[in-house]
Image: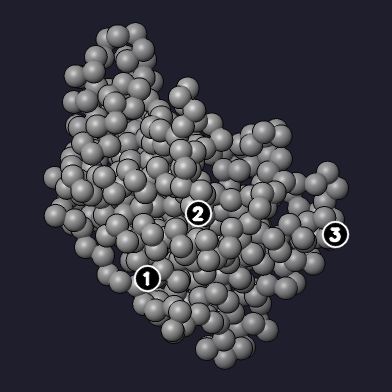
């Protein structure tokens, strides 16, 4: 559910902030004197390494000029995702003229810090260049030309970064929600590409990406597929499961399923058992899984004090932890990526979830001043204290042939 974000500070009352951050490990001299084996002094990447799990973040390339942002992004995580700079509107704002500058800057950052890259995103119905959508709308781009343009885009982007991308989000958010189904009242496909090319574009995109880079892991990525519902016609997770099963049966090179895991503390929590069940069921199809865009937003109270904010941040920590525990319990869950690590750069600051822009925020594991929140400590603890027999090292994944 990634959109163009602008930086906006999400305010926390001073009292609440002091009460919360006092509970969480910082980089103070007192902490630095603890034994090196103390998990509270270790990065998420270091703690995850013994599980062979990659822990990552989405990167706001514009924020890399901030030394603190850059330092955390380069040391805390073992994998990174470009938040916006590899989307079509950013790469080809003018037809036939690519602008690789921001995407290349992101790649240089990742490679300088020896971080694996999740490429995001090749085919999505949002953040498309105006020349493309307007051409389709006015009839100057017909169906045949549109398919050719999509093939060229996928091929050009994957070829440019061939051998440098670990996982690609090939197709993103192609399926309707159970709470917002189509006219027939059941979950199905949605969006610009389905409306103009039909469902066959999904298989096409995976085949084109595989032809351009045989060694990258190719993922289908979506939100609200963190757990199965009743398996019926409104169960989005079931629809995605059936879709991937059918694609695999037809020989389409789908290597993985990414569950975005955009959650909110205002809704009922998933348990780690529900999350592990969903990941394991997808793994049973012969694909890898990943949690790809994790954040947990909060419906902000009018009065922000320790009494009103602290319960939200504790609930947030539970959700981050349940997702991590579910991933650790499923051996083909190979990466856990937070969608931005600090509240100051979170997309939730600028998005309206129904109650107004910015009314659901504080979604990240660091606050706007780069201080770790309880959710960060929860992830540290989950990684530090998990082990056999329930948590075993990841099963290495290879691209489908």
Q: Is residue 318 above or below residue 161?
A: below
Label 3 crowd (10 A; few <14 / some 14-19 / many >=20): few
Determine if residue 223 is in view. no
Residue 291 in percent (x, y) is at: 44, 57
Q: What residue is rendered at 52% in x and 49% in y?
A: 229
Label 2 crowd (10 A; few <14 / some 14-19 / many >=20): many
Q: Secondary structure at mark 3?
A: helix
1 vs 2, front mark: 2
Q: Are marks 1 and 2 in contact (CB under 8 Å)?
A: no
Which of the two residues, 313 or 70, is positioned nearer the viewer here?
313
Q: First in sequence: mark 3 or mark 1?
A: 3
Residue 176 in percent (x, y) is at: 46, 34
Q: Which mark is residue 227?
A: 2
Q: First in sequence: mark 3 or mark 2?
A: 2
Determine if residue 183 is in view. yes
Label 1 crowd (10 A; few <14 / some 14-19 / many >=20): many
Q: What residue is rendered at 26% in x and 14% in y?
A: 141
Q: Which quadrant of the figure has residue 364? A: bottom right
Which of the two residues, 180 or 235, is positioned nearer the viewer here?
235
Task: Kindly report the distance in space between the C-alpha atoms of the residues bearing marks 3 and 2.
Answer: 31 Å
Residue that label 3 marks: 307
Residue that label 1 marks: 331
């Amino acid at each position: 559910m990634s959109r163009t974000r602008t930086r906006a500070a999400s305010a926390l009352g001073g009292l609440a902030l002091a009460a919360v951050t006092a509970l969480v490990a910082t980089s103070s001299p007192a902490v630095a004197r603890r034994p090196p084996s103390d998990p509270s002094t270790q990065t998420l990447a270091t703690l995850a390494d013994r599980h062979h799990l990659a822990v990552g973040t989405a990167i706001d390339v514009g924020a890399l000029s901030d030394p603190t942002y850059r330092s955390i992004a380069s040391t805390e995580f073992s994998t990174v995702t470009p938040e916006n700079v590899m989307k079509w509107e950013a790469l080809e704002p003018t037809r036939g003229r690519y602008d690789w500058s921001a995407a290349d800057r992101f790649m240089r950052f990742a490679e300088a810090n020896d971080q694996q890259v999740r490429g995001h995103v090749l085919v999505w119905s949002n953040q498309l260049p105006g020349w493309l959508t307007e051409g389709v709308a006015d009839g100057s781009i017909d169906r045949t030309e549109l398919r050719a343009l999509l093939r060229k885009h996928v091929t050009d982007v994957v070829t440019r970064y061939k051998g440098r991308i670990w996982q690609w989000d090939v197709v993103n958010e192609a399926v309707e929600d159970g709470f917002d189904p189509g006219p027939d009242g059941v979950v199905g496909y949605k969006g610009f590409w389905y409306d103009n090319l039909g469902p066959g574009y999904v298989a096409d995109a995976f085949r084109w990406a595989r032809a351009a880079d045989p060694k990258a892991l190719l993922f289908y990525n979506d939100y609200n597929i963190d757990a199965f519902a009743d398996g019926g016609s409104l169960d989005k997770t079931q629809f995605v499961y059936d879709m991937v099963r059918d694609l695999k049966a037809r020989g389409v090179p789908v290597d993985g399923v990414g569950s975005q895991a955009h959650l909110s503390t205002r809704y009922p929590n998933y348990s780690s058992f529900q999350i592990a069940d969903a990941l394991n069921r997808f793994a049973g199809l012969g694909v890898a899984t990943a949690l790809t865009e994790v954040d947990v937003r909060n419906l902000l109270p009018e009065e922000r004090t320790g009494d009103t904010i602290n319960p939200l941040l504790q609930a947030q920590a539970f959700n981050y932890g349940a997702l991590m525990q579910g991933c650790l319990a499923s051996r083909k869950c190979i990466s856990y990526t937070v969608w931005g690590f600090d509240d100051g750069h979170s997309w939730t600051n600028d998005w309206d979830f129904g109650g107004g822009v910015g009314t659901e925020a504080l979604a990240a594991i660091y606050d706007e001043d780069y201080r770790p929140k309880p959710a960060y400590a929860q992830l540290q603890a989950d990684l530090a204290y998990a082990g056999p027999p329930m948590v075993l090292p990841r099963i290495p994944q290879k691209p489908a042939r």
